[in-house]
Each structure stands twice: as C-alpha cells, then as structure tokens.
Amino acid sequence: MRTRTLLAPASLVSLLLSCSAEAARSPAIAADALEGLRAHVQELGERSEHGAETVEVQHILISFEGADPRVAATRTRDEAERLAAELFARIRAGKDFDGLVRDHTDDAYPGIYALTTGKPASQDVYPRRLMAPGFGDASWRLAVGEVGVAAWVPVTCPIGWHIIKRLQ
C-alpha cells in the first residue's frame, strides 16, 4: 500500500527551500533499475547547466518516513529509492509521466513549478535559491522534454527523490 500526502505548493517550497505492485518483480529487475537510477544520477550530476534563466518542471516526489514531518510517507528510505528507480525505468520505457505523477507523487498533483535564477516575474515563479539545491541542479541540467532524477542526499535533496521532467 502506498501512502500519499498532498502538499500545498507553499509547503513544498518550504520543504524544497509501499512500493507499487510492480515492485514485486524479480530481484534482478529491481537491481537493474537501481543500477540504472544510480548511473543516471551520476551522469546528470556531471553535466553542465544550460543557460536558461527560467525553467518549468513537473516532478514526482518519492519521500520516506522521517525525511520531513510535513510528509506522511510510511515507506523506508530503501523502499523509496527502489520505487524511484522503478518509476524512472517505467518512464524510460515510455510510460505516461503525468499519469505516474498523479498515481505516485508525495507532492500535490500536478507538481508543476516554474523556477528562475533571476527575479520572479509572478507569484507562480519561485527563486531557484529557495529550492533544494539538488532539485534546481537537476532542473537546470535537463533538456526540454527530458526526464531526470535528483536523488535523496541529506543536504541537497532532504525530503526524498525527485523524478523531474523539464517542460520549458
């Protein structure tokens, strides 16, 4: 059973400022998905950032128990990583990103955020510097339409894994 807590955009900004049925697949497939996720995170981290001032992204937040008291996830950190790996593999295989956001995010659906390195043009645009560093770093390394992952790291992505699709 999966636990979902919907966060208001302001709550997520402050946070960023049960595995699915497919998790029961063979251990070899799960290990391959984890290996693929970890390799992707490393590769994305080695990329240069593009020069856009503003990006718009949609994301799936996969959190875990104890990551932040405002997220009521009950899965363990290991279960969260496995779920993130599995969802990322499904996205790479062509599954509908928006549908996976709707079904799996620990954030409020649709999980779309505009971020800027400059002065926000409206209340719907968030300064990059107020977001978790790993979230912004991944967002600025993706090409439009590309999906990437910002992995949980206590300092840079403290509330879990973010599977991010750059929309603009």
Image (cartoon, rainbow, N blue to C red):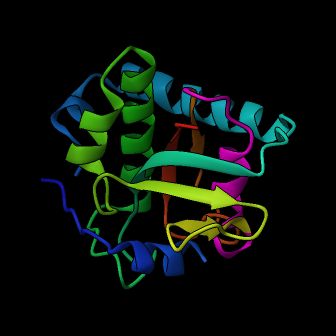
Q: Is residue 64 left or right of residue 38?
A: left
Marks counted in the figure total: 0
Q: Quadrant of residue 136?
A: bottom right
Q: Is residue 42 left or right of residue 161?
A: right
Residue 161 belongs to magenta span: no
Quarter of the C terminus within the rendering: top right
Instruction: Give the residue at x 73% y 45%.
Output: 140
Query: In the displayed image of the protein, which residue is found farthest to the left?
Result: 1
- Position of residue 54 relative to residue 141, above or below, is below
- In percent of width and height, residue 59 lies at 45, 48
Query: In the displayed image of the protein, which residue is found farthest to the top?
Result: 93
Instruction: Give the residue at x 77% y 61%.
Output: 117
- In percent of width and height, residue 144 lies at 61, 29
**As rendered, which of 164 and 53 lies closer to the eye?**
53
Q: Quadrant of residue 16?
A: bottom right
**As rendered, which of 67 and 138 lies closer to the eye?**
138
Residue 136 belongs to magenta span: yes
Instruction: Give the residue at x 69% y 51%.
Output: 54
Instruction: Give the residue at x 39% y 14%.
Output: 93
**As rendered, which of 46 and 80 lies closer to the eye?**
46
- In percent of width and height, residue 25 lies at 25, 24
- Position of residue 25 relative to residue 59, above or below, is above
- Position of residue 73 relative to residue 97, above or below, is below
Q: Is residue 9 left or right of residue 53?
A: left
Query: In the displayed image of the protein, which residue is found farthest to the bottom?
Result: 69
- In percent of width and height, residue 76 lies at 36, 62
**As rendered, which of 42 and 7 lies closer to the eye?**
7
Q: Residues in magenta?
A: 129-145
